[in-house]
Amino acid sequence: MNPSPADHAAQDENYWAGVRAQYAVSADFINLENGFFGVQATPVLQAFQRYQEQLNLEGAYFLRERFPARLAGVMRALAEFTGADTGELVLTRNLMESLNILLQGYAWRAGDEVVLAEHDYDSVIETLEMVAARHALALTRLTLPLEPDSDEQIVALYEAALTPRSRVLLLTHMVHRTGQIMPVAKIAAMARRHGVDVMVDAAHSFAQLDYRLAELGADFVGVNLHKWLGAPLGLGLLYIRRPRVADIAPLFGDTRRAADDINKLAHVGTVPPAPILAIEDALAFHQAIGSARMEARLRHLTQYWMARLREVPGVRLFTPRAPQRSCAIAAFGIEGVAAQRVVARLMEEYRIFTVVRAIGAEQCVRVTPHLFTSIEQLDALVRAVGQIAAGAR
């Protein structure tokens, strides 16, 4: 397969130096924990601050007279970016609110079964456990290979877990622990043949990977806008394919809207408008780079440091080797050194910030570069890990 133009652009260090200049980040340490949320690029931050100042100047007038039309424009921009209809999208505070709306609003029947994976997000699993206790549901949990042979192997494992009672399959598009990308569209097609609904946690894949929401093949998708889109912290999005909107009951009371109006799910009271308005600016910044180019750059950065750590004795990678199976997120461990100790030493001795994540009974160090990460900073990571690993031998 010939490299795409985006793949070639991923290694254009002059171009990416210009992108890095659009971010103001601390020089006190190297931030390689960008999976939690994505800092705003300077143009987005400045726009957010202008909106906040305007709100403070105009008060209720801004909220009552200006904000409704501006909000409609934001939703049109999101619809264009995601390939969805405005009637299929509603803003939330984050992925967890989106998934709670789905899981608590779904029409469960006692005895229904939900299939999920041990690698799914901890708080989503906790929500499922709560809902299962309330509605007498059964939860079936899968452990999937860290280094799969193929997409078909993963699809087959999910299919083998289905039973006549299976009602919903929870899928994480990009695993927050290891960065592994699940073949969501193939799994969703399989589930549809069995009459099973699919709910997708796309918290990390949204705006990190180049795709449209409908391409996932699921009727229900929750995302974060404050991760890889770089919108202000506290913004998520819920997608429900239009014919299924009526099937989800509101989590918050709303008696004014029709059952098939997705806005029935967002009756949460007064919300801060400045972060919402800055979504348009985050979209403009993202699109100026391009989704395909951003994905290629993030994958290049991750493959760069992983390839070098594979050669370091005592280091184990928890992320699939095939480049297409991960992007910005990846994880490693050092034999004989607890992951928490590695994270502490990286920060204390080398001023490199990372985070610990659990994979079953094991723990790993998660590394997540961003567009402002330089090759030199990744070289510093590789040297630091090599020194820690050498000291453990």
Image (cartoon, grey):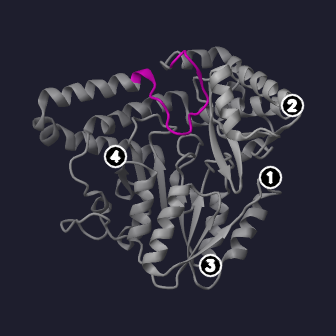
Element carrying mark 2: loop
Q: Where is mark 4, residue-wise?
A: 75
Q: Are marks 3 and 4 in contact (CB under 8 Å)?
A: no
- Mark 3 lies on a secondary structure that is loop
- Specify the amino acid type for callout 3: His
Name the one closer to the observer, 366 or 216: 366
In the rendered structure, which amino acid carries the disc numbered 4?
Met
Horizontal side of 129 relative to 93 (left or right) equals right
x 57%, y 62%: residue: 217
Residue 137 within the magenta-colored segment of the rendering: no
Span of residues in magenta = 26-43
Residue 147 is marked as 1
Give the labeled residue for mark 3.
194
What distance separates the C-alpha of mark 4 from that of mark 1?
A: 38 Å
Marks 3 and 1, how far apart at CA: 27 Å
Judged by depth in the image, the label closer to the viewer, 3 or 1, is 1
In the displayed structure image, the side of residue 123 where residue 327 appears, left or right: right
Q: Nearer the viewer, residue 298 or 293?
A: 298
Looking at the image, is mark 2 or mark 3 nearer the viewer?
2
